[in-house]
Amino acid sequence: MSDSMMKYNVRKGLAHIFLYAVTASLLFPLFWMLMTSFKSPNEWVTYPPTWIPTEPTISNYRFIFFGSAGRFARTYSSAVIPYLNTAFVAVTSTLVAIVIGVLGSYSLSRFKTGGSLTLLSIIMPRMFPPMAMIIPLMIFFQLIRAIDTYWGLIIVYIGFTLPYSVLMLKGFMDGVPKEFTEAAMLDGLSEWQILYKIWLPIIKNGLMTTTLFLLILNWTEYTFALTLSSRGVETITLTLAKLFSNEAGTYYGPQSALGILAAIPTIIFGIFIHKHLAYGFTFGALKR
Amino acid sequence: MSERIKRKGKIPVNIIMLLPTNIIILFLIIIPTILVIWFSLVNFQPTFGINFWQSKFVFLDNYFKILMDDEFVKAVIRTVYISLICLGVEFTIGLLIASILTGNIHGKKILYPLLIIPIMIPPIVIGNNFWLIFSANGPVNQIISIILNTEFKASWFSHPKYAIIPIILSEIWHWYPLTFLILFSGLVNISTSEIRAAKILGATEWQLSWRIKFPKLKGIITIALVIRMMEALKVFDVVHLLTHGGPGTRTQTISFYLFKYGFKYSRISYVSAGAWIILFISLLGFSLALRSVLVERK
């Protein structure tokens, strides 16, 4: 073996070790949360902390789902309803945003409607910090009585994921070959039929990716839920924050259990579309 | 094509299709934006008992007041410096991992999704996560104790100087996958033939990255920078969960400041002026982003 070959191998080995070490340490917070979620109460705050629970228990998860008669019963009952709330709001708003997005992006991709100005007005909302928009939105919502309602929250979620929906789908639609559309036009199909029968089947995967991406965004949302619907519609992120506040600050076990449960769906969705995440977060600026 | 649409004599189909999008944008973006402008120019608080359309017009008074407010200016500066630190660290981590991962690495297919898990996690869960590991009896204190070889038990979240550290770290942890993803896809797209040619011509590793890789990545780096800055302006969830801006106002970011004055103290006009200043800054950044995106597309 030559000298340079040896050097190459050493470097490669070091790169491997380094990368594995970095990955492990970056996953440490998650590992810690997972472990804490299986710890029994007397292990939550012992020092030095135990890295792996000595007597693993699922009592934390039971608490999350069924609540308990302990001193937290007043502020916390069960995560089942928030879970269903989140699922309902996230799925509904995602589906509506996708339908609206499909129509809008078809119009933009096929006819270049409105040119870049339309595109600009669609991306802009997502560039603003939501906190700057929430106060007028809240006053507007008070006028139309949408505070603390399901449909109010759903509308907000639709509005703030729509830019992603339109731009991501537009990116996928731009890749549809012209020949298909021309052939369909010769066959006398209407625009709606071209969209439904030709384009949608072609961008099927893109549609799926966009849907999952929007689901992640809606599932992880906290700011709007906190300010616009905290008394009416409790989402899972609100439950976590609630379990967190006041006396429950050191209630580590159930907190981690709920954290794990809240993160699992988004991690699953995310793994599915991990190749397209960068595409989504950059509004399609980054090619797939 | 346009003839085909117009022939029917009705509203063109492309307009109909774009209509729902425009309606949503109108109701959720344009109307609130106009309301923000109006609020910022009048003196309106719900507690005054006067409707907002009858409030007293004070012109730029709110803007002067908020710009003179030390707390606001500090929150802006703090947000900027948090995002600068985050950007720096995230770029270093992202570039490092991306450049190693583009090489011939075993288990690449598993490492890649594992490395980007943090970006998929709800920010509130990330806050919770860092609350656990930075708790007084948590692993971070334990590890520091072992390294320093003395008992180290800081209560991070109530310490006036250290409280910002868990927040910055959680931000970095949440968003490094984005820079990593962007840089990775940039590096992958550089053609190998060009690099091979440079190597044959005797280019060193340093020249390779500085002369060939960097110029090709410039556009993509700009996008990453701008989008990351936009996200930094939104830092709220973690602050709200971990420190509530405290101790005192030591960890207040822009978003948290707006939240506090808007929702706790109901100073609508005052906050609207602040919001508009932030929107203006974002718009500037946004137009930059759009330009770089357009350049990239060409």
Image: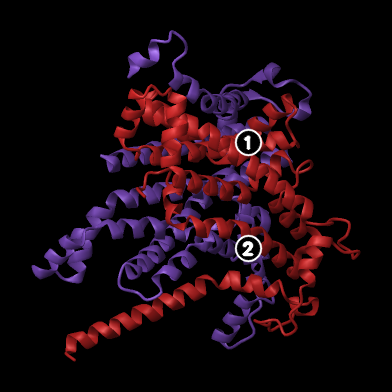
Chain colours: A red, B purple
* Residue drawn at the location 49% of the way across and 57% of the way down: B175
| Badge nearest the viewer, 1 or 2 | 1
Q: Is residue A45 something that shows in the picture?
A: no
Q: Secondary structure under badge 2?
A: loop
* Depicted B281 relative to depicted A278: above or below: above
Q: Which numbered tag is attached to residue B79?
A: none
Residue reaching furthest to the left:
B201
Residue in the foreground of this view, choosing between B294 and B289: B294
* Depicted A161 relative to depicted A52: above or below: above
> Mark 1 — residue?
A156
Residue in the foreground of this view, choosing between B221 and A6: A6
Compared across the picture, whether A67 is left or right of A269 comes to right
Label 1 chain ID: A
> Mark 2 — residue?
B160
Please identify the quarter of the rendering in which residue B263 is found: top right
Label 2 chain ID: B
- Residue B197, horizontal then vertical, whole percent: 12, 64
- What's under tag 1, amino acid-wise? Val
